[in-house]
Image (cartoon, rainbow, N blue to C red):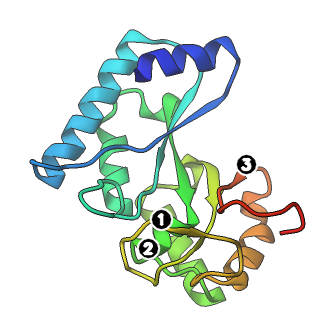
Amino acid sequence: ALTKELERCALLDIPYLVLHPGSFKGSTEQKCLDQIAKSINSVFEGHAGKTRLLLETMAGQGTSACYKFEQISYVIGQVSSANKRLGVCLDTCHVFAAGYDLRTSKTYHEMWQQFDKTIGIDKLYAIHVNDSKKELGSRVDRHEKIGRGEIGLKAFELLFNDPRFFGVPKILETPDGTLED
């Protein structure tokens, strides 16, 4: 299915495809991470398109893998053509639910410093912009309208005024609302 999706992206000249990496139900986190990398390697061996696959940061709900920066870094390190074909999509709600605080200037910059040290800012190609209905570290993936959740407006003010990310696509995934919202 992933190969077919990459083929469709190539036909439409779509530069990125965001992927929820997987879960370890009935297994271990480590075996899951190894399987994710093995699967991506297999897909890349069979498809030579230009679309970059973006691993999305996850909230850690249930048995979801890749909720820690170290897990995403591990997968990237195990993929043979990672430098050219693999990147990251950071979801603000997911990282917050996973325990990464971005609500104040201090914690926002610390989170990005940890991201850069562990994964590399150069691997960031997209951002899903969502507030969170649940508290920091809850590991529960529940998106909320910007400024109405537990993250609050300050984090988004910092994000949208951070020159490092001016050219990074940002996708709003909040619950339904009106155009005014």
C-alpha separation, residue under disc 2 versus residue under disc 1 = 5 Å
The answer to which of 94 and 52 lies nearer the viewer is 94
Give the labeled residue for mark 2: 97
Q: Nearer the viewer, mark 3 or mark 2?
A: 2
> Does residue 95 appear to the left or right of 69 in the view shown?
right
Q: Which sits earlier in the primary sequence, circle 3 or circle 1?
A: 1
Q: Position of residue 181 (x, y in %)?
A: 83, 69
Image point (51%, 21%), residue name: 5
Q: Which sits earlier in the primary sequence, circle 3 or circle 2?
A: 2
Q: Amino acid at mark 2?
A: Ala
Give the labeled residue for mark 3: 169
Give the labeled residue for mark 1: 94
Q: Position of residue 67 (x, y in %)?
A: 36, 61
Are dots 3 and 1 in contact, CB under 8 Å? Answer: no
* Crowding at mark 1 (Cα within 10 Å: few <14, some 14-19, many 20+): many
Are dots 2 and 1 in contact, CB under 8 Å? Answer: yes
